[in-house]
Image: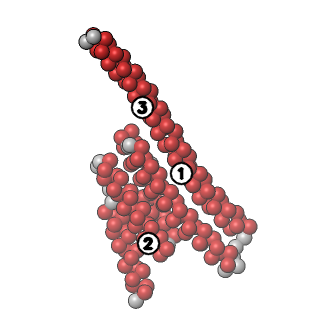
Amino acid sequence: MKRLTLTMSIMLFFIATIAIACEPPTKKAYLENFKEFVDKIGETHKDMSNSDWKKAKEHYDKFNGEWYEKFKDDFTRNEKNNINEYKLKFNYYQTLHKVGNTIDTIISGKGTKTTVRELESELQRLEEALDGAEGTAEELGKEIEGVLEKFSEHTGKFIEDLQKVTEEYLESIK
């Protein structure tokens, strides 16, 4: 019964994947489909086989590559942050799978120095992805600072102009 439930879960995952496998016609569809795809990975990643991961990675590469390129100039800063979140989540789930496989190999006694290096490599890749997310947050912070600075400059100029006009008006009515 448990095997049947697992098979049904994986089957549902791939049905959902097929439903969103076509190239999204709009930016909104791209964002919704990418989020749905990553959410489905999050729900099923523990039960996915290596073959399932290969198919999921191929689909992810489309979201991260050709489909992203189609809309990249139209994304707002917030949408880009959401996309980076989806990428980070996918890479997190994929790394969990790879690390789990590597640990299983080591525990089974079939591990080698190469297996340990693969584990270190996957952990390094995850760390780099997290560093990239921090970089995105820093960029966003700098952009917000720039906008606030420009707003402050324009507001200061507006107040100076308003003060000047008010003084001129008061002089004219004396």
Element under disc 3: helix
Examine the rendered structure and indicate whether residue 89 appears above or below residue 9: above
| Mark linked to residue 152 | none
Q: Earlier in the sequence, mark 2 or mark 1?
A: 2
Q: Is residue 34 visible?
A: yes
Q: Amino acid at mark 2?
A: Thr
- Cα separation, mark 3 vs mark 1, equals 27 Å
Could you tell me residue 167's position as x and y percent? 34, 16
Q: Earlier in the sequence, mark 3 or mark 1?
A: 1
Kindly identify which residue carries mark 2: 44
- Cα separation, mark 2 vs mark 1, equals 24 Å
Kindly identify which residue carries mark 3: 151
Packing grade of label 3 (10 A; few <14, some 14-19, many >=20) is few
Packing grade of label 2 (10 A; few <14, some 14-19, many >=20) is some
Kindly identify which residue carries mark 1: 133
Which of the two marks, 3 or 1, is nearer to us in this view?
A: 3
Q: Amino acid at mark 3?
A: Phe
Q: Residue furthest right?
A: 113
Element under disc 2: helix
Q: Residue furthest front?
A: 174
Element under disc 1: helix
Could you tell me residue 166's position as x and y percent? 32, 18
Q: Is residue 135 left or right of residue 17?
A: right
User: Could you tell me which residue is drawn at 42 percent across and 62 percent down?
Assistant: 38
